[in-house]
Structure formats: C-alpha cells, structure tokens
Image (cartoon, grey):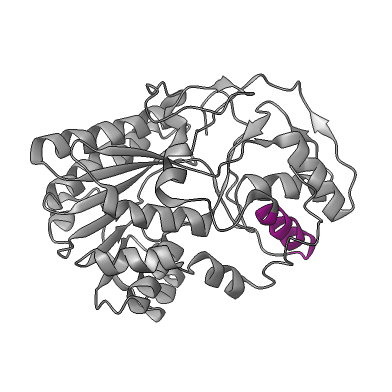
Amino acid sequence: MPDAQTPSAPEGPRTEEEIEDLLSQPDEALVACMGRVGGDLAVLGVAGKMGVSLARAAVRASREAGVDRRVIGVARFSDPRARDLLEAVGVQTVRCDLLDPRAVDNLPEAENVVYMAGRKFGTAGREALTWAMNTVAPAYVARRYRASRIVAFSTGGVYPFVPADSRGCTEDDPPDPRGEYAQSCLGRERVFEHFSRAQGTPMCLVRLFYAVEPRYGVLHDIARWVWEGEPVPLSVPRVNAIWQADANRQALRCLEHTASPPAVLNVTGPEVLSVREVALACGRILGREVSFSGEEGERACLGDARRALDLFGPPGVDARTALAWTARWVRRGGRSLDKPAHFETTDGRY
C-alpha cells in the first residue's frame, strides 16, 4: 500500500455529521440509475450500520434525478435514534420483526427491495437464532415481494479461504463456508435462490467483503490496535475492503442487474490489502510503533472484484484514502461503533 500520509489523500471527515454526509452522497451514476429504476424502494434491515446511509443515498439520488419515490426503511428499531435520523432525511419508517410472517405480509408495496437484515455478531452460543434470522426471514420476504426486484446482501464469507497471494474467489467459484454463521449466510442465498427460481423473482446476491468507514471496519480495527499499542494479528494476512459509500452505491445500482435465477456479485475494492502494510501505514500516521502477534497466515478470505469493476467502474474512494481518513479519525479520538469486523478469525466462530 502507498504511504497514506501522501498529500494526495485529503484530510477526511472531522465530525460524525460529515461522515454520514459522505457515506450517503450519490454520484452521477447512481443518480442516473435512480432515474431509470421505477417504483418505490424498501430497505429491509435499515437500522444496521450500513442501512441508514444506503437509504439516505437512495433518497438523495432520487431527488437529484427528479423522481418522486417513497424510500421505506424497515427494521425493529430497537434504537429509536436510527428511526429519527431516517425520518429526518425523508425515509418513511416501518417497525417490523422480519421473523413474524404476518407482519412481513403487511409491509408496504415496493417495486424495489434491498435486503440488509442478518445476524453475525454473537452467533456463538445462539446459533439457532442466527439460522432463523438468516434463512427463515428471507423466505417470508421473498414470498411477500415476489413481484419486486430484490437485491440481497450476503458475505464473502460463503467462499473458502484461498492462498493469501491470490486475487481471491470469483463469483463462479463454488461456496464452501466455514463456521455456522457463514453456513447460514449460504443458507440465506439458497433460500432467495429457491424463491427466485420458483416465482421468477429477479434478484441479485451481493457478496460484500468488508465495507469500511472511520468508525468501524477492518481499517478501523487495525488503526485502533496500533493507536492503543496492541499487537496486530497476522493470522489472516490479507484482506479486501471497500469504502461504505461505494458499497452503498454499487448495491443500489444492482437493482438494474437482477435476474432469475439470481445474479451474484462480489462487492469489494479492487486491491488486496496486506494487513502488515496497513498497520505500518497506520503507525506512520499515528506516530506509533507497530507490533504484530502470531505467525503470518498463508490463507485468507478474498474476493475478486473484476465483475463489479466492469459494471460500475472503480470505487470513488480508494483504500489509501479510506485508511488515511480512518487513522486520522482514530488519532482525533473519534467515536467507534465498537463493532469489530473479526477479519482475523479463522475458525468461523463470531
């Protein structure tokens, strides 16, 4: 990775309001897409760490395109602040437990659906809930929105670990998930695939590899370890990452790339990042000595993003810039979402 202190990397956001604005900023391609895609949009699982900015990006892009559409945010809203924020920016919110089939059947009509609901952290010890959330809820949703386009978030964790010096798995490589969380995510994909084939519902399965922003993600985790003087684990020596705003924009643009049976797309940055080099770059920005723990692993969970690059072009924010912004945020004492990515996990237990 090039030195993240180079002048070409801008200073980055200084407040959470600036972060939220950056993460929800549409580009010209998304505005054009929202102008072409007709109908309302429902974002299910909107209260998660990506959902608020994705829904807000859809609102902003639709307004810039001159399209009058409802963007409907659906979640349990255990934290009312997310609901207030969404309502303030023009998202119509609906409280719903997606494991309640009657509640799902009563959700508003929407020609377009982005499914972001899922369970990961805390899976160990509560595997049954993880499987229910990741496989049963999709069945209810797919049945309710049989006549809609559906973009469903998945994870690169459905792929096997591959040699760390490789470009990663392509969409044509067979899944081989490790651990119950990743297995349940493949289950989610298979449930959506079943309903797509049975109903003819056009879908796209988005296999996301580590969205990042200054408050969470693999770059944030590494920066915090360096800042706090903790050794950086090398058990997984290389990672993918994509700036969250770019992941949002690509996911929304996937509405134009749905198919039956479902299309599959790796969404991540074009670079494969060395954990060691990222940590050393953080050390330079933060003015900290860097230490490492464990033997450097030989395998990693990596995705080849060439198909997405062909469809959407390169991300608007590259890894060097995202790293610089993140490290400076950590140095300034910016808030963490305290949602570690656990990228260093090799046994699939979260």
Left/right of residue 97 with respect to residue 102 in the rendered view:
right
> Which residue occupies 39% across, 32% down?
127
Residue 48 visible? The answer is no
Compared with 294, 34 (above or below) is below
Nearer to me, 337 or 31: 31
> Which residue occupies 33% across, 60% down?
76
- Where is residue 23 shown, x and y percent of the image? 52, 64
> Which residue occupies 58% across, 39% down?
240
- Where is residue 288 shown, x and y percent of the image? 89, 49
- Find the magenta span and give its range: 321-333
Among the 4 quarters of the image, the one containing residue 132: top left
Left/right of residue 287 with respect to residue 161 in the rendered view:
right
Left/right of residue 350 with respect to residue 338 in the rendered view:
left
Q: Is residue 331 magenta?
A: yes
Q: Main secondary structure of the magenta part?
A: helix
Among the 4 quarters of the image, the one containing residue 199: top left
Compared with 163, 324 (above or below) is below
Q: Is residue 314 magenta?
A: no
- Where is residue 58 shown, x and y percent of the image? 36, 67
- Where is residue 47 shown, x and y percent of the image? 41, 61
Among the 4 quarters of the image, the one containing residue 208: top left
Question: For the N terminus, which image quadrant?
Answer: top right
Left/right of residue 95 with respect to residue 338 in the rendered view:
left
Compared with 291, 23 (above or below) is below
